[in-house]
Image: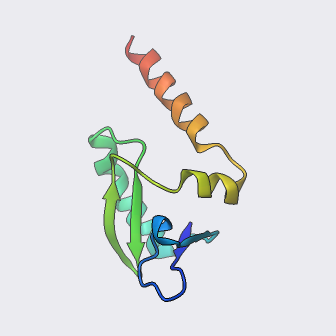
């Protein structure tokens, strides 16, 4: 999703009045994801969020990815269900 700043605001934070807009990943966005994937897997991080501004990765959120409600609304999905299904699968594989 793309965050759009509120009028007269430079920050696009949802908590500061920004809004979520559906968007598509650019080829650069996909390249960043491909480059991050091995490291995220090595660190066993399977639920993260990234911030990209322009063509650059600016942040990797590993403790509290935001935007679930907005993505669910934009994509008509339930990310939290996918998350917990993955947690359950991982737990079953180690028990």
Q: Nearer the viewer, residue 46 or 2?
A: 2
Looking at the image, residue 17 sits to the left or right of residue 33; the answer is right
On screen, 16 above or below 49?
below
Q: Residue at x 34, y 70 (%)?
A: 57
Check the picture and name the quadrant holding the C terminus. Answer: top left
Query: Is the image coloured rainbow, by chain, by secondary structure, or in one colour?
Result: rainbow
Q: Position of residue 62 (x, y in %)?
A: 33, 48
On screen, 63 above or below 29?
above
The residue lying furthest to the bottom in this view is 8
Q: Residue at x 65, y 43 (%)?
A: 78
Check the picture and name the quadrant holding the N terminus. Answer: bottom right
Looking at the image, residue 6 sits to the left or right of residue 95; the answer is right
Q: Nearer the viewer, residue 80 or 16?
A: 16
Q: Residue at x 45, y 84 (%)?
A: 9
Mark count: 0
Q: Position of residue 23 (x, y in %)?
A: 62, 71
Q: Position of residue 91 (x, y in %)?
A: 43, 19
On screen, 70 above or below 81?
below
Q: Position of residue 34 (x, y in %)?
A: 41, 59
The residue lying furthest to the right in this view is 76
Q: Nearer the viewer, residue 34 or 53?
A: 53
């Amino acid at each position: 999703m793309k965050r759009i700043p509120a009028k007269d605001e430079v920050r696009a934070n949802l908590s500061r009045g920004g809004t979520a807009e559906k968007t598509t990943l650019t080829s650069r966005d996909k390249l960043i994801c491909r480059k991050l994937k091995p490291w995220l897997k090595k660190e066993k991080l399977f639920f993260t969020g990234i911030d990209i501004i322009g063509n650059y990765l600016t942040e990797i959120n590993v403790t509290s990815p935001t935007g679930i409600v907005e993505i669910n609304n934009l994509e008509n999905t339930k990310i939290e269900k996918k998350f917990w299904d993955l947690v359950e699968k991982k737990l079953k594989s180690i028990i």
